[in-house]
Structures are given as structure tokens and as C-alpha cells.
Image (spheres, rainbow, N blue to C red):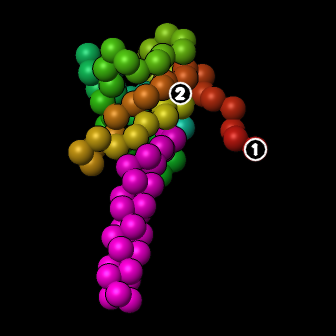
Amino acid sequence: MKRALSLVALVSLVLTGVALSADQKFRADGTIQRLSGDRLLMRTSAQDIEITRDAKTKVTGELRRGAAATVFYDKVAGMPHATEIVMGGAPKPK
């Protein structure tokens, strides 16, 4: 009985970890270096990030190469996918 309960607890912890990592959101602040139909290259202080976007991506402002922006994204199949792009940058969270 103890073995069965231990197994159930272990499975529950693993599934909780998987669920939390799937909902992870990321933020990139920087300058747009390149734009194409479904991708943008963002230069941040740490690195360049290529991010995909689609019709569901919310865009505030006009997308322009060389402009400052904040991109909120998640990872789909390990690749960054934009959920929101704020031109001029978004305010820093408190």
C-alpha cells in the first residue's frame, strides 16, 4: 500500500512540473533588427533572439526595423513564439 501511494505521489509531482513548465512566459526587451512575414530578430542586451509570430500575436504600435520593443513570448516546440509585441517597450513590472 505504501508503495502504491508513493508511486501516485511521484507521478503527481512529475505531472505538476510538466504543467508548470508548459505555462512559462518569457519577455525580451531590445531592438528589432530584422522583420519578415512570420519572424523577427530581436537584439537584447544578452543575445539576439529569433521569434516567430502569427495572426494571433497582439501588436501595439507600428512594427519597424531599428525600433525599441518588448516581446512577450512562450516556447512552442522549443522555439520562441510571440504572444504580444509592444513597440517602444512595455513598462517594467514592479
The residue carrying mark 2 is 69
Residue ID at (24%, 45%): 77
Q: How many marks can you see?
A: 2
- Which of labels 1 and 2 is toward the front? 1
Residue lying furthest top in this view?
A: 62
Estimate how packed mark 2 is, as few (under 14), some (14 to 19) or many (20 or more) residues with alpha carbons within 10 Å.
many
- The image quarter in which residue 43 lies: top left
Which quadrant: the N terminus?
Answer: bottom left
Q: Is residue 11 magenta?
A: yes
Q: Is residue 93 magenta?
A: no
- The image quarter in which residue 2 lies: bottom left
Is residue 30 visible in this depiction of the protein? Answer: no
What amino acid is labelled 1 in the image? Lys
The residue carrying mark 1 is 94
Magenta part of the chain: 1-28
Secondary structure character of the magenta stretch overall: helix
In front of the other: 41 or 17: 17
Estimate how packed mark 1 is, as few (under 14), some (14 to 19) or many (20 or more) residues with alpha carbons within 10 Å.
few
Give the x, y percent position of residue 73: 43, 36
Residue ID at (44%, 46%): 23
In front of the other: 79 or 43: 79
- Distance between the Cα atoms at labels 1 and 2? 19 Å
The correct choice, above or below, for 63 with respect to 89 in the image is above
Mark 2: secondary structure: strand
